[in-house]
Image (spheres, rainbow, N blue to C red):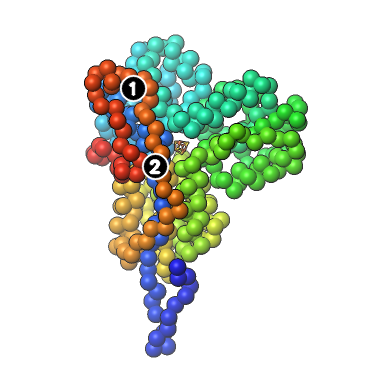
Amino acid sequence: MRSPRQGATYHGHVAEQRKRVLLAAPRGYCAGVDRAVIAVEKALDHYGAPVYVRKEIVHNKFVVETLAARGAVFVDDTDEVPEGARVVFSAHGVSPAVHAAAAVRSLKTIDATCPLVTKVHKEAVRFASDDYDILLIGHDGHEEVEGTYGEAPDHIQVVNSPDQVDEVTVRDPDKVIWISQTTLSVDETMETVRRLRERFPSLQDPPSDDICYATQNRQVAVKKLAPECDVVITVGSANSSNSVRLVEVALDAGARSSYRVDTAAEIDPAWFEGATTVGVTSGASVPEILVRDVLASLAELGYADVEEVRTATEDLMFSLPRELRSDLKAAGTPVTQPRRGRRTELTVEPV
Ligand code: SF4
């Protein structure tokens, strides 16, 4: 691939270099987000509005607004849901205390926790029952971290970043394991682990990667294109951990500048002053329609030439939450879910 800094000269002038977009693949919806969004859509179709959803079903403003327009009611906690009503738990997962609070109010729950988050919960439970000190690398206050922490608060401490490693204290340095939030920067997490291991050489690794396939794949793709880019645009919301990580990963990998936008409307033409190559990616909770809007805006700015940079192909899909599946089945409604990659946007129109 030609470097954006290479240019031909003619008539004593530097020829204008070809403006282009490098489009990361994989990008956008992961299997866990796809499943959670479809779960709310199908719940609305099957039970009718309102369907309550605890927290944002996925961290994307457009998705939340679109589902709200169809009758989903987003609440902060179960005590805002009327007794006996139906509530969907978000892809980020909830602690056992939230399940218990829902049971006290006789709520009918649909648990859309991503199976890869559930896997981390199970690790926490298992190592807590073996009396390990568990170091949960993740962002304090993030819903996923709250949910995992709540599985074993007596055994877990949250480590936010490499800089926090020195504050960690454990009961037995020979019985310590780290686990992590699913949507972190792989490189920063490995740095935190390296520093933790300096302090606790017997630190155990989790049985398998906690940073999920989708987070890793999106970071690998953006790392590949970033060194050639004057600007990288990540489509994703400010509260989307994996989207914010993509902005940082692009910069670390050599992009000259890196911005996050919720929608094309936030693009500032001043970002592209003198820019030849623009990278585009999107977080795991972002419908492809928002990326298409960004590409259309870039085309208007002269970046109409789009080249995809693919580093992996994804075909993972998860079945719908058990509670919903059995209700749909009982009603004779098909429970099949579109395969990942074929579904490119919400099935509902924004209003
Ligand atoms: S980003 Fe990963 S853990 Fe989170 S919902 Fe998607 S697949 Fe699941």
**Mark 1 neighbour density, 10 Å: few (under 14) some (14–19) many (20 or more):** many
Work out whether mark 2 precedes mark 1 in sequence or the reverse, and give the earlier one: 2
What is the total number of numbered labels drawn onto the structure image? Answer: 2
**Along the line of sight, the residue nearer the viewer: 267 or 112:** 112
Above-or-below relation of 323 to 142: above
Q: Are marks 2 and 1 in contact (CB under 8 Å)?
A: no
Q: In the displayed structure, does residue 67 sit left or right of residue 249?
A: left
Which residue is the site of mark 1? Answer: 324
**Which residue is located at x 39 percent, y 80 percent?**
15
Above-or-below relation of 235 to 152: below
Quarter of the figure with residue 153: top right
Q: Position of residue 69 (x, y in %)?
A: 27, 33
Above-or-below relation of 69 to 266: above
**Which residue is located at x 64 percent, y 22 percent?**
128
Dot 1: what SS? helix
Name the quarter where the C terminus is drawn.
top left
**Which residue is located at x 33 percent, y 22 percent?**
324
Q: Which mark is residue 130?
A: none
Which residue is the site of mark 2? Answer: 315
Amino acid carrying mark 1 in the image: Leu
**Along the line of sight, the residue nearer the viewer: 45 or 204:** 204
Q: Position of residue 226 (x, y in %)?
A: 49, 59
**Which residue is located at x 52 percent, y 34 percent?**
142
Name the quarter where the N terminus is drawn.
bottom left
Q: Position of residue 160 (x, y in %)?
A: 61, 38
Q: Position of residue 258 (x, y in %)?
A: 48, 56
Beta carbon at label 2 within 8 Å of ligand 1: no
Amino acid carrying mark 2 in the image: Asp
Q: In the displayed structure, does residue 46 sit left or right of residue 274?
A: left
Residue 79 visible, this angle: yes
| Alpha carbons under labels 2 and 1: distance apart | 23 Å
